[in-house]
Amino acid sequence: MTRTYDEVAVGEELPPLEIPVTRTLIVATALASRDYQDVHHDPELARARGSKDVFMNILTSNGLVDRYVTGWAGPAAAVRSIRIRLGAPNHPGDTMVLTGTVTAKSEGSEVVEIAVRGTNSLGAHVTGSVTVRLPKEAGAR
């Protein structure tokens, strides 16, 4: 379903998205994004560097935030920007829950700003905002 600019309201909450954080997700997405740092695939070296286990990289978190917003907005949406900060690490065996709220609309440009937060058992993993352009009417691009 494609969301249109006119049907979105400031204050609207996006439905939460639960993402199981598996070792496979962490390792595969680090490798897919060409992030070969050992803390994303080698548990022993991650522990030697002070972490309790391997942890998710920022490119994966960024991609999951994009997936979350575009899953809500629909295929006609165009992401304009993603600005995020990382907090608590995502370790294997945890679940990250993404939530979001529409915080602003820009008349004339059909751009919507969404505050996004991803939490796990340790606290906030990712916080930030996404701006996305929505079609003015259904069927438009």
Image (spheres, rainbow, N blue to C red):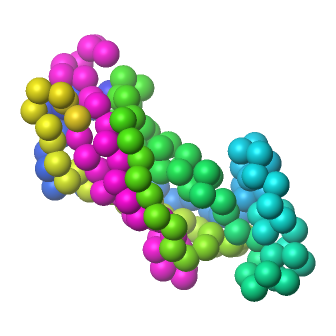
Dividing the picture into quadrants, the one containing residue 95 is bottom right
Residue found at the far left of this picture: 107
Q: Residue at x 87, y 76 (%)?
A: 45
Going by the image, does 90 lie left or right of 92?
Answer: left
Judge whether 98 appears above or below 6 on screen: below
* Main secondary structure along the magenta-highlighted residues: strand
Relative depth, front residue between 95 and 43:
43
Quadrant containing the C terminus is top left
State whether residue 111 appears in this view: yes
Q: Position of residue 135 (x, y in %)?
A: 25, 23
Q: Nearer the viewer, residue 89 or 84?
A: 84
> Which region is colored magenta?
112-141
- Return the x and y of residue 113 as percentages of the image width and height: 25, 46
Q: Where is residue 59 drawn, in percent x and y?
A: 61, 51
Q: Is residue 43 magenta?
A: no
Image quadrant for the N terminus?
top left
| Residue at position x 62%, y 52% in the image | 60
Question: Left or right: where does residue 46 sit relative to residue 115?
Answer: right
Q: Nearer the viewer, residue 90 or 17?
A: 90
Query: Who's the residue at 16% across and 55% down the image?
Result: 11
Residue 16 visible, this angle: no
The residue depicted at 73 percent of the width and 81 percent of the height is 51
